[in-house]
Image (tube, helix red, strand yellow):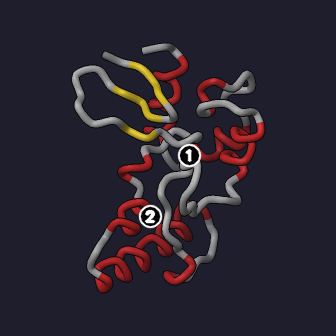
Amino acid sequence: MQGRHNGLQIEKGKTMEKMIAYCGLICHTCAIFLATREKDDEKRAQMRAEIALKIKELYGKEYKPEDINDCDGCRTKSGRIFCKDCQIRNCAKAKSIENCAYCTEYACEKLQEFFSTDTDAKKRLDQIRSGR
C-alpha cells in the first residue's frame, strides 16, 4: 500500500513510514533529527560539531555546534524545529501544501538550488509528484 497521511509518506512493501520534509528530505535520516534523539551527551555533541561543518560545506552558512538545536522534523505541528527560517519550508507552509511536489511552481529556483546539494530529495519529490 502506498499513500500519504499527515506528512508521512508510506512506501509500498515497507513497514516504516517516512516523514518527508517540504523539500524532499527524509526527516528520520537527517543528521539533526538523529542528533536530537541521541541519548549519549558526548556523542550528541560530536554529531552537532559534524553537522555544523557539513552545513558550512554544503550551504556556506556558519554555525557553531551549540547553534544546532533539537529538531523533530520540519513538518511537526508542535515540537522542536531546526529550520524555522528555511525559505522552502516557510513558502510551503504559507501555501498550505504537504510538500513542494504539490506546488504549482515546482520546482522553483529555491528548490533547484537546494537540489544541487541533495539530488535524492529531487527524486523523492519527483516520485511523489508523478503519483508513484
Q: Nearer the viewer, mark 1 or mark 2?
A: 1
Q: Residues within 10 Å of mark 1 (few under 14, many from 20)?
A: many
Contact? badges 1 and 2 (CB < 8 Å): no
- Residue at 28 percent across and 74 percent down: it is 39
Seen from the viewer's position, the closer of residues 110 and 96 is 96
Circle 2 packing at 10 Å, graded few (<14), some (14-19), many (20+), is: many
Could you tell me how far apart the alpha carbons at marks 1 and 2 are, in whole angstroms?
A: 14 Å
Q: Indicate the amino acid at tag 2.
A: Ile
Q: Residue at x 59, y 33 (%)?
A: 99
Q: Position of residue 5 (x, y in %)?
A: 47, 28
Q: Identify the image quadrant of residue 42.
A: bottom left
The residue that appears at 77% across and 40% down in the rendered structure is 94
Whole-percent x, y for residue 18 in the image:
37, 38
Q: Give the left or right position of residue 40, taking residue 56 as reference.
A: left
Callout 1 amino acid: Arg
Q: Quadrant of the C terminus?
A: top left
Q: Earlier in the sequence, mark 1 or mark 2?
A: 2
Residue wearing tag 2: 32
Viewed as shown, does residue 73 lie left or right of 59? left
Q: Position of residue 23 (x, y in %)?
A: 57, 41
Q: Which residue is mark 1?
A: 75
- The residue located at (47%, 57%) in the rendering is 72
